[in-house]
Amino acid sequence: MATAHNVELRAAPELILADALHPVSEQTPRMRSRWIVAPKAKGWDSYAISEWELIGAGFADHHPHDEISLILAGELHIEVDGTEVVGRAGDSIRVPAGSTGRYWAPRYARMMGVYGPNPAGAESHYFEYWEIDASAS
C-alpha cells in the first residue's frame, strides 16, 4: 500500500505547441530553428531538442556533445572528417561529440535535432554559413 511517504512523484506530460521557425541570426536567413527542449547554459545531463531547417544553405560547426538529426523532409548532407552522408525523410544521422561537421541542404531540409548530454555546458562553435544557388545545380 502506498503512503504519502513512499509514493514516487512523476511529472505530468507537457504539451509543446507547434511554432514557427525563426532565422538563427540576421546573418543566416536560410537557417531557421526553434527550441523544443532548450539546453541549459550551465550544462545538461540528458538532452536538448530543436526543430530546424535549411533552405538552399549550409553551415559548419564544432560541438562538444552528440548530435542526432532526424530528417523530416527534404535532403540533408553532413560531412565529418572527409566522410559525407546524405539523409532523406525518415533517415537519421548521428554526429559524434567533439566533431566538426558541415551541414547543407542543396534545396531544402527540415530536421528534428537531439543534442547531448553536455554536463559541463561547453559551447558549440559556428565557423561558417553559406547559401546555395539552386539554379546552378
Image (spheres, rainbow, N blue to C red):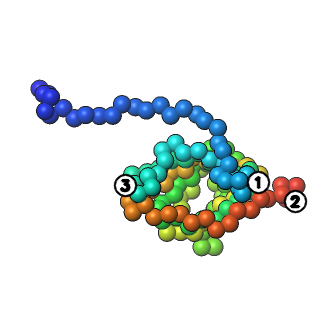
Residue 87 % position (x, y): 64, 54
Quarter of the figure with residue 131: bottom right
Point out the tag, 1 or 3, that comes first from the N-terminus. Answer: 3
Q: In which quarter of the image is the C terminus?
A: bottom right
**Residue at the spot x=72%, y=57% of the render?**
27
Which amino acid lies under the numbered mark 1 shown in the image of this protein?
Gly
Alpha carbon of mark 1 to alpha carbon of mark 3: how far? 34 Å
For the question of whether residue 117 can be seen, the reply is: no
Mark sitting on residue 136: 2
Point out the tag, 2 or 1, that comes first from the N-terminus. Answer: 1
Which amino acid lies under the numbered mark 2 shown in the image of this protein?
Ala
User: Would you say 82 lies left or right of 49 here?
Assistant: right
Instruction: Say which of marks 2 and 3 sits in front.
Output: 3
Point out the tag, 2 or 3, that comes first from the N-terminus. Answer: 3
Numbered circles on residues, count: 3
Residue 77 % position (x, y): 67, 59
Looking at this view, is 85 or 34 the one in front?
34
**Residue at the spot x=62%, y=44% of the render?**
72
Q: Mark 3 points at which residue?
A: 45
Q: Give the SS element for disc 3.
A: loop
Residue 63 % position (x, y): 52, 64
Looking at this view, is 79 or 31 the one in front?
31
Q: Quadrant of the N terminus?
A: top left
User: Would you say 90 lies left or right of 1 here?
Assistant: right
Mark sitting on residue 56: 1
